[in-house]
Amino acid sequence: MKIKIIPDKCIACGLCHIHAPEAFDYHDNGIVKFYDTQDQEKTFPDAPSLRTAVKSCPTGALKIDKDI
């Protein structure tokens, strides 16, 4: 599954990192980023923790690309 980050929507609440710390980290200003890259899209194996992280985002800053 491909996940996209929309930084302008992130409010630095931390829920994504709580649910999937293996995938999400933060810039110095608290805005979400992927743990190991500065890219704003990344493909992961399907995992419940990632789906929960995306669904938990209160602002929609994380999206699953359903075209993949």
Image (spheres, rainbow, N blue to C red):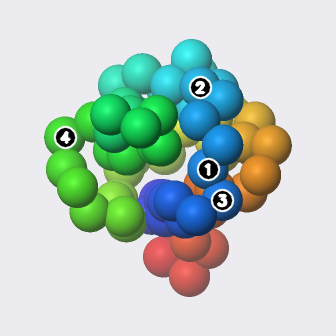
- Distance from label 3 to label 4 (Cα)? 21 Å
Which residue does the numbered mark 2 point to in the structure image? 14
Q: CA distance from mark 1 to mark 3?
A: 4 Å
Is there a contact, CB below 8 Å, between mark 1 and mark 3?
A: yes
The answer for how far apart the CA atoms under marks 2 and 4 are is 17 Å
Numbered badge on residue 64: none
Q: Is residue 50 left or right of residue 30?
A: right
Mark closer to the chain start, 3 or 4: 3
Residue at the location (57% across, 17% down)?
A: 18
Q: Residue at x 46, y 34 (%)?
A: 30
Q: Amino acid at mark 4?
A: Asp
Relative to 68, residue 37 above or below: above
The residue that mark 1 highlights is 10
Please give the label number shown on residue 9. 3
Q: Earlier in the sequence, mark 3 or mark 2?
A: 3
What residue sits right under mark 4 in the picture?
A: 36
Amino acid bearing label 2: Gly
Around disc 2, counting alpha carbons within 10 Å, would you say few (fewer than 14), some (14 to 19), or many (20 or more)?
A: some
